[in-house]
Amino acid sequence: MEAWSQVLSITLFAAAIRAATPILYPALAGIFSERSGVLNIALEGVMLISAFAAVVGSYYTGNPWIGVLCAIVAGMLTSLIHAFMCINMRADQAIVGTGINILGAGLPSFLLLKLFGSQGISPIVERIHEWRVPILADLPIIGPILGEQSPLVYICLLMVPLSWYVLFKTPFGLRLRAVGENPRAAETVGISVYGMRYAGVLISGFLAALGGAFLSVSYLAQFVKLMTAGRGFIGLAAMIFGRWNPWGALFACLLFGFADALQAAAQAANVPIAPQFLRTLPYVLTIIALVGAMGKAEPPAYVAKPYEKA
């Protein structure tokens, strides 16, 4: 009982916010891509490539924010390849995504060896430290949870209402959703289907890149082989559970983040539960969420379907 009292503290909720962040970024990324009609299972690979680029940028400049910019460039370039293959070449979107995930698993390992002479881990680099927000940090209950987090956490949380507003309250969002639901009808009213799909995938790459950068230059201060540990896929599960809506995705990510933080805290407190079970908790919860969403979550009507101009 004493071990559980150590686990269930206010710091658990602060850790849950941190753990939810690298899941929420790819969840929002997937929403933009799939709302435009492009299936995006490549988020894991984009995050890995971006995480490595962030470490390289931070290592050579000594500035982790330059590392974040490098991550964004790498993530968007990778997404540009993804978009070209899926939109212009009309390749199978699931196969393209799988290929990028394989690239994301292999390319950083190869470059680690070439740049740092290491098999699976980079040198320690400068990281982005937590910010203490004066007024917020002094509030009871909320302060210890949200008052001192990485700026990339705050950016991620701000992206939720911003993404919702862009998708559902702007002409751009209306056009993006239109090409994901009925591209032929969208084209007849003058909307560029290819242009909107490229926009959706590139925004997706930008957001996934921030998730990768958070892991390597904020959450940690180095790149570790396969450090995303399936968070890109969990983000996709959160997207489906949240029904392709940023607010729904936020709720799902907080749930998954809490499970991740709970298993870490329980292991640290030596709770008498098999550690193997605790480590699988976030992934089991992901499967349960996907099963629960089956038949209820309706994806965009034209997602994963190549489109050919009339």
Image (tube, rainbow, N blue to C red):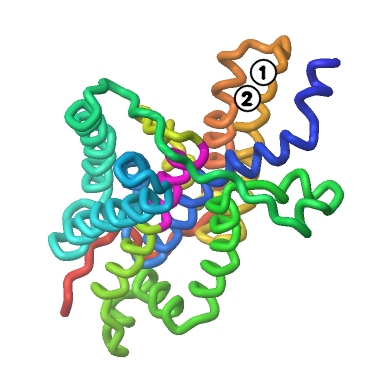
Image spot of residue 86 (x, y percent):
21, 58
- Asked if the stretch drawn in magenta spans residue 88, the answer is no
Q: Secondary structure at mark 1?
A: helix
Q: Residue at x 40, y 48 (%)?
A: 63
Classify 43 as above or below 305: above
- Residue denoted by label 2: 264
Question: Which amino acid lies under the numbered mark 2 shown in the image of this protein?
Answer: Ala
Residue 290 is at least partly visible in this image: yes
**At x 37% / y 63%, what residue is drawn?**
203
Percent of width and height locating residue 259:
64, 33
Residue 211: say if magenta: yes
Residue at the location (36% across, 30% down)? 226
The x, y position of residue 53, in whole percent, is 30, 44
Q: Position of residue 51 (x, y in %)?
A: 36, 42
Residue at coordinates 25% horizontally, 52% vertically from top-left?
78
Q: Amino acid at mark 1?
A: Ala
Look at the magenta stretch and give its main secondary structure.
helix
In the picture as drawn, the residue positioned furthest to the front comes out as 62
| Tag 2 and tag 1, C-beta contact below 8 Å | yes
Whole-number angstrom distance, CA of label 2 to CA of label 1? 6 Å
Residue 62 vs 250, above or below: the answer is: above
Whether residue 237 is visible: no
The image quadrant that residue 268 belongs to is: top right
Quadrant assignment for the C terminus: bottom left
Of 146 and 226, nearer the camera is 146
Look at the image and give the residue range highlighted in magenta.
Answer: 207-219
Category of crowding for the residue at label 2, using alpha-carbon neighbours closer than 10 angstroms: few (below 14), some (14–19), many (at least 20)? some
What residue sits right under mark 1 in the picture? 268
Q: In the image, 194: left or right of 170?
A: left
Q: Is residue 156 left or right of residue 305?
A: right
Q: Secondary structure at mark 2?
A: helix
